[in-house]
Amino acid sequence: MEYLASDEMTVMEKLGILSDAAKYDVSCSSSGVERKGNGVDMGNCLKAGICHSFAADGRCISLLKILFTNECIYDCKYCINRKSNDVPRATFTPEEVSDLTIQFYRRNYIEGLFLSSGIIGSPNYTMELLYRTVYLLRKVHRFNGYIHIKAIPGADARLIQMTGFLADRMSVNLELPTAEGLKALAPNKHRVNILTPMRQIQTGITENKHDLVVYRHAPQFVPGGQSTQMIIGATPENDFQLINVAEALYQKFELKRVYYSAFVNVNEDSQLPALPGGPPLLREHRLYQADWLMRFYGFKAGELLDEQRPYFNVLLDPKEDWAVRHLECFPVEINRAPYEMILRVPGIGVKSALRIVKARRSANLTFETLKKIGVVLKRALYFITCNGKMMYPTKLEEDYIVRNLTEKKDRIQFGQDGMTFQQLSLFDDGSFDAMPTVVDRFASAMGQL
């Protein structure tokens, strides 16, 4: 195997360039693997995440996250590292990456490695370099910590397989949701080339599970599963298309996660969309919420959106939006409803729903009990009853519920007696079609109405 010759640039200079170049890749979760220290190798790995430290949006913040190189033979219009861009370039050697990882680990800066790369030379050559890096870490340095590595589309299947037996998680970036989007913005990449290694990794994981049943000490193949990433907002797909693509990936390739990355316009190109409001971060957030509902709450993509409503509500999260559009399913009686229906109540999460089902076996639950269990009552109270009664006298009407969920200044503040702390006005009732005039307000103040 041929290696890259080192140049005059120092390792720390390369690190500055290649860690900054990796910031646009968000698929770096470290969950899903548990491996205890064995007293011989260096480090360990916990299911809950490296050092149990994650950002608010779920991204792991304790990995050494770098590109092997930002050199690239491709010219994707959205990528800062495309070959036509005049940016500082750097390339590590496998020895430099493995040494950096060990030195950072020994200083307690990180507990694992997230390694991606531009395509240097060819997909095969790049994959060889990545394999050599992870081989040095596992077999030479005896590093037992978490490693997430990219599978390069177009690389030889044998290289991907060998890397999979050394890595904890692998990912292949889908990049853009549709083949049409790829053709327009990434003409060097093809959907078939991207899906082929995804299928190989899925097949390898399935076969390895069978091998582990037969041979207990067989090496594990990508034990943390695989993930992917889609760029949001660079191409004109709507939210309904995006969650359908994600649902298909979960079903067909058994992915652990689909990551959504709001498009950041870093290049001047006429084919890229203008972003007057900046990156679509709220849209990214809504997609993550919907993704969570599909993975853990039993929702289907077709329930959350459809062709008539192809975008998520910017004011309500997807679960609240579904609930107010399906008021015929509510209110839900907490003491009798099935677990699957309790999961669909806004303000009730998976853990809270499990606690409810367990607690009601021994006693009838009250709203005070639900609060202690962890239910967010300010959202749930419109959709549930306890022993046939609602928490406060509220209306099961879409406009009324939406107004109270979204408008903080007008949100009803309930006291323990069910009365509100807000002084009522004659014209607050939503049944009035016309707004009061100045004459009406004066007459009301003078006691003439």
Image (spheres, rainbow, N blue to C red):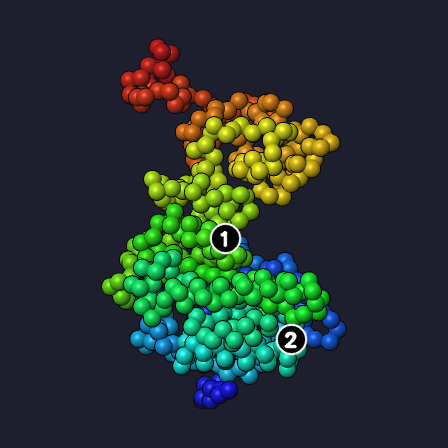
The disc placed on residue 444 is none
How crowded pointer 2 is (Cα within 10 Å; few <14, some 14-19, many 20+) is rated as: many
Asked if residue 314 can be seen in this view, the reply is: no
On the rendered image, what quadrant is the C terminus found in? top left
Looking at the picture, which amino acid does disc 2 mark?
Phe
> How many angstroms separate mark 1 from mark 2 (CA)?
33 Å
User: Which quadrant holds residue 118?
Assistant: bottom left
Residue at figure coordinates x 44%, y 45% from the top left:
301
Task: Spot the residue most to the left.
Answer: 270
Task: Spot the residue most to the right.
Answer: 39
Residue at mark 2: 143
Residue at figure coordinates x 43%, y 70% from the top left:
153
First in sequence, mark 1 or 2: give its number: 2
Q: Position of residue 447 (x, y in %)?
A: 38, 11
Q: Position of residue 128 (x, y in %)?
A: 50, 80
Q: Nearer the viewer, residue 244 or 86?
A: 244
